Amino acid sequence: MTSTGTSVDPMSKQEMTTKEITKFVSKDKYIMEMYAVIDGKETKMIEVVYTRK
């Protein structure tokens, strides 16, 4: 699942485009990645791996 939107950069106070990708690996695991889109180039800001115990 992919979502795009905008948010405010807390350092520069400028609005920036963001992209979030959620990958469902299995019923017990999924991965969320968030990217900032700067000058048309995607830069990964965070990756979170969720695992059910």
Image (tube, grey):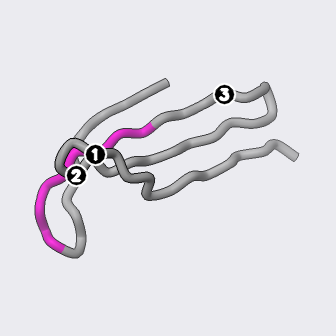
C-beta proximity under 8 Å, tags 3 and 2? no
Q: Which residue is mark 1?
A: 41
Mark 3 and mark 2: Cα distance apart in space: 27 Å
Residue segment shown in magenta: 12-20
Residue 29: image quadrant is top right
The amino acid sitting under disc 1 is Lys
**Callout 2: few (<14), some (14-19), or many (20+) C-alpha neighbours within 10 Å?**
few
Element class at badge 3: strand
Taking the image as shown, residue 51 lies to the left or right of residue 44, namely: right
Residue that appears at 78% across and 26% down: 26
Question: Measured from the top left, where is residue 34 in percent x and y?
Answer: 44, 47
Circles 1, 3 touching at the beta carbon (< 8 Å): no
The main secondary structure of the magenta stretch is strand
Label 2, on which residue?
38
Instruction: Please state if 49 lies on the left or on the right of 46 as rendered.
Output: right
Determine whether, in the image, residue 4 is placed left or right of residue 49.
Answer: left
Check if mark 2's residue and mark 1's residue have beta carbons within 8 Å.
yes
On the image, the x and y values in percent for residue 46 come to 50, 56
* Frontmost residue, 23 versus 52: 23
Between marks 3 and 2 in the image, the one whose residue lies nearer the viewer: 2
For marks 3 and 2, the one nearer the N-term is 3
At label 2, the amino acid type is Ile
Q: Secondary structure at mark 1?
A: strand
Q: Which residue is mark 3?
A: 24
Other-residue count near label 1 (Cα within 10 Å), few / some / many at <14 / 14–19 / ≥20: few
Q: Position of residue 49 (x, y in %)?
A: 68, 48
Dot 2 falls on a residue whose secondary structure is strand
Earlier in the chain: of badge 1 and badge 3, it is 3
| Amino acid identity at mark 3 | Phe
Q: Position of residue 44 (x, y in %)?
A: 44, 52
